[in-house]
Structure formats: C-alpha cells, structure tokens
Image (tube, rainbow, N blue to C red):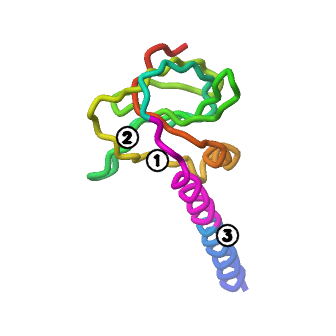
Amino acid sequence: MRLIVLILLSVLLLHSCISSQKDMLVDLKKMNDCVKKWEERITQDTVKARVLLFENKTSYTTAQFSAFIIGVTPYQDTIAFIDNSFNGKLKANDNITFVGSIQKMDRNLRILPASGRNKKNNLHYCKVKFYSFGKFIDVN
C-alpha cells in the first residue's frame, strides 16, 4: 500500500514539474516573439527613465548576455536600454540616465529574459517598441 502511495505521489510531482516547464517554455517563446519586434534606435541622445525590469550582465558557457533594462521615460515610452559593460545592480523604480552610442561596438542583441522568475515582469517585453545600445551614466 505504501508503495502505491509513493508511486502516485511521484507521478503527481513529475506531472507538476513537466507542466511548469511547459508553461515556462510558452512564456519564453512569447517573450522572444516580442523581442523580435523591437526596433533598434541608434542615437547619442541622453534619456532619463524609471526602471521597470533589470537583468545583470552575465555569461553561460560561451554565450555573453548584456546588462539591460526595460524602463519608462517621462513621456511614458517603454524602451529597452542595453549596456555591454555595466556590472552594477539596479532594481525596479530606480531612476537612471542613459546615453546612447553610435560608436562601433558589439550590437548583438543578446539579452537573458527573466522568464519563470516573475511572470509579471515578462509582460514588459511586449510593451517595448525600441531599444538602444549605450551606457548607464547616472544611477540612483
């Protein structure tokens, strides 16, 4: 009898894990579809924004991922900013100043989505219309 109960619990746990993984893959696909629609804005403008989402610069094996934020400007535009050299920490509602760069640099849009960690944050990816490369110059 105990063996049957253990088997049933194992099956339920396995089913739960598979279902959770499947949901995460669906979220990741949706986010990637949204990111594909982003248009790059090459600019030297300075932009102030309030952070909605921040992801650290990181690497996995040979893949390098840039630090990026999704932020909202004073004009209520939702924009993604990518900084290939930023190693600091930011959190939601921090204010930043970002200066765009037209210099030759690695303009490969390689960001690591926050999928699965906070589903609410994943919605921000679909609000972004434009992204820019540059530097975070004032963080507070």
Label 2 vs 3, first from the N-terminus? 3
Task: Looking at the picture, tell me which residue is in the foreground, 14 or 99.
Answer: 99
Task: Looking at the picture, tell me which residue is in the foreground, 71 or 23.
Answer: 71
- Name which residue type carries label 3: Ser
| Front position among marks 2 and 3 | 2
- Name which residue type carries label 2: Thr
Q: Is residue 90 above or below residue 111?
A: above
Residue 54, x across and y down, in percent: 54, 34
Q: Which residue is mark 2?
A: 58
Mark carried by residue 16:
3
Q: Quadrant of residue 82?
A: top left
Which residue: 53% across, 36% down? 80
- Name which residue type carries label 1: Leu
Mark carried by residue 112:
1
Which residue: 61% across, 42% down? 128
Mark carried by residue 25:
none
Magenta stretch: helix, strand or loop mostly? helix
Q: Is residue 10 left or right of residue 137?
A: right
Which residue: 60% across, 20% down? 94
**Would you say residue 136 sits in the magenta stretch?**
no
Residue 52, x across and y down, in percent: 63, 32
Label 2 vs 1, first from the N-terminus? 2
Q: Are marks 2 and 1 in contact (CB under 8 Å)?
A: yes
